[in-house]
Amino acid sequence: MSMKTSTREDFLEALCVLSRTKSNITTIDDLSLYLSLSPVETRNQLGLMEQQGDLHIQPEDRVELTEQGSHIGCRVMRKHQVLECFLSEILGMDPGTASEEACVLEHDISDEAVERLDRYIKRPGGRGFRMQRRWPHMPTLLQFPEGTELKILTVKCPGGCQRLSDMGIFPGERIKIIHTLNNKAVVIQVKGCDIALSPEIASCIFVEKT
């Protein structure tokens, strides 16, 4: 029995995202929750992927990516991030819709096309560069109290936001403010994981209430 390429890529992408947002190894239950699938369906798909050399299912249902699986998953994750950024910031789509469209497009777009899109987005003086000026008027994480549920509109960190994207912090994602510290650092919840952000980073994440 074989599985669809898009399904395989979705699973590997999810495992890559979870590996960057969790402090311990991802389990089958973690992945089921992330993908909104039943544990039985998730286990069956993972069994096929283990046969293909993408991962190993360890004791206590822990899932460990192989070098092959990690390479494919990170490649798809990067495609999603670039596509979502292009659709939301350059084409002006709603961040949530842009994320959904990116999920569809990421399976067919070539690596070359993604690299060209990424260079276009980052081009100084280009449309993507100019559109950044509209975000300073939007609220950031620092402007909301503990317990507030938010949707990320955009992330504008100096020097790039790859590490935040790797942790699941990107446009369209829904988060919750768990705790604010005396130094204005913020602890947020993303996909069930708690992540601490410095006030400098939190001030670069533009959001709206859900």
Image (spheres, helix red, strand yellow):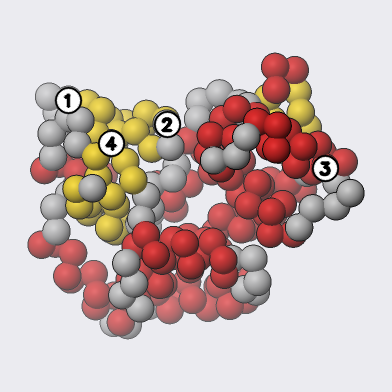
The residues tagged by marks 4 and 1 sit, at their Cα atoms, a distance apart of 15 Å
Tag 1: amino acid:
Leu
Q: Which residue is mark 2?
A: 192
The residues tagged by marks 1 and 2 sit, at their Cα atoms, a distance apart of 20 Å
Which of the labelled discs sits on residue 176, or is there none? Answer: 4
The residues tagged by marks 4 and 2 sit, at their Cα atoms, a distance apart of 10 Å
Q: Evaluate if marks 3 and 1 touch, with contact meaning CB atoms under 8 Å apart.
A: no
5 relative to 192, above or below: below
The residue sitting at 13% across, 40% down in the picture is 144
Q: Which residue is mark 1?
A: 181
Tag 3: amino acid:
Leu
| Residue 93 point in image, percent of width and height | 34, 72
Q: Evaluate if marks 4 and 3 touch, with contact meaning CB atoms under 8 Å apart.
A: no
Q: Evaluate if marks 2 and 3 touch, with contact meaning CB atoms under 8 Å apart.
A: no
| Residue 69 point in image, percent of width and height | 73, 46
Of label 1 and label 2, which has the lower sequence position? 1
Residue 43 falls in which quadrant of the image? top right
98 relative to 150, above or below: below
Of label 4 and label 2, which has the lower sequence position? 4
Residue 130 falls in which quadrant of the image? bottom left
Q: Nearer the viewer, residue 158 or 41?
A: 41
Of label 4 and label 1, which has the lower sequence position? 4
The residue sitting at 20% across, 52% down in the picture is 208
